[in-house]
Image: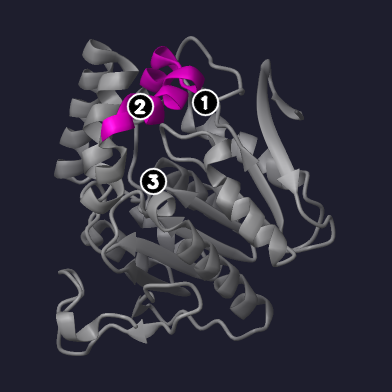
Amino acid sequence: MPFLTLGSYRIRYELAGPANGPAYVLVNGLTQYAELWAAYRDALVAQRFRVATFDLLGQGASDKPSLFISQDDQVEALHLLIGELGNGPVFLSGISFGGLLALRYAIAHGERLAGLVPMSTFAELSPQLLLLGNALRTGLILGGTSYLQDLLLPMNLSDAWLKPLLKNLDAVKRQGWLVNDVYALQNLMESFLDFEPLTPKLSSISTPTMILNGEFDFLTPRALHETLRVHIPDSSLVIIPKAYHAFTLEKPALTADLLSRFAGDVLAGRWQGNKAIWIAPDEPGGAMIPFPAGHDHLRAIPASGTAT
């Protein structure tokens, strides 16, 4: 199990796939850990990508500082990891909190990236997101990790995904209890206490960018992704049909396929962001379709415009 060193801290990471292949770096959400990317690692390695995953400071097998964990330190840890990948093309993707870190990395070190895929994320704290974040932090402090999971699961995932798990929910949650420390999670949440919006800096991202947003994302709804689309010059917004905030857990095969296709388009010189809005297919390999003209893309996908 290799580790990177950042000051006095150790950051656990893993590399898989051919050393000479284009790389994908996958950044965890707030309560996640690297093993949750296993399906992505396998799918992308099969497409000859090199895949890098890691536990953020405060997660999994990485060190868990007892006090404040800075987002700057997380970006620096990400920079160390990308430094392990050599000089080949690097594609960076992150989900939720990880998407925010990916945006921050692209602002600071965009010249190192071939492509960027922020997923279920945000550049600023809207009033709703700020209040939700405060409520989740209070829930963690008063009720612990298990209670935080009870709050997040119905916010993040669909009924269809949750229903078969209800009779065995404690077993599903147990791994999160084992790898994520309650105080470290609190520290991760408190890294937002001095948060400043990234929106004024988004126009500096010249990297090709595919923004992914679930159709029914409750935590980070479409308007937050619209901010990214409007301000990042070479971007497109892709809406995942019938998906929620944690669509990376519900739809790993589809999402991995979208990541692979995006990188292929960039490497082949086919990518043209044009701030376009697309609807993803329901299954891997399906056709992307433009969001139907004459409809408001900040609302749900029109029934006549669903992907096939």
Look at the numbered disc 3 and give the secondary structure of its residue: loop
Indicate which disc, 2 or 1, sits on the residue closer to the N terminus.
1
Number of callouts in the render? 3
Q: What residue is at 41 percent from the left and 34 percent from the top?
A: 30
Amino acid beneath label 2: Met
Q: Position of residue 118 (x, y in %)?
A: 45, 57
Q: Is residue 38 above or below residue 12?
A: below
Indicate which disc, 3 or 1, sits on the residue closer to the N terminus.
1
Residue extending farthest to the right is 20
Indicate which disc, 2 or 3, sits on the residue closer to the N terminus.
3
Q: Residue 12 vs residue 218: left or right?
A: right
Q: Residues within 10 Å of mark 1 (few under 14, many from 20)?
A: many
Q: Position of residue 133 (x, y in %)?
A: 24, 33
Residue 15 highlighted magenta (yes or no): no
Q: Which residues are magenta?
A: 167-187
Quarter-of-image position of residue 231: bottom left
Q: Residues within 10 Å of mark 2 (few under 14, many from 20)?
A: many
Q: What residue is at 18 percent from the left and 69 percent from the top?
A: 298
Q: What residue is at 37 percent from the left and 73 percent from the top?
A: 282
Q: Residue 5 vs residue 193: left or right?
A: right
Which label sits in the foreground, 2 or 1? 1
**Do labels 2 and 1 touch, CB within 8 Å?**
no
Q: Which residue is mark 1?
A: 59
Q: Along the line of sight, which residue is nearer the eye, 40 or 132?
A: 40
Distance between the Cα atoms at labels 3 and 1? 15 Å
Q: Which residue is mark 3?
A: 96
Q: Which residue is mark 2?
A: 189
Amino acid beneath label 1: Gln
Amino acid beneath label 3: Ser
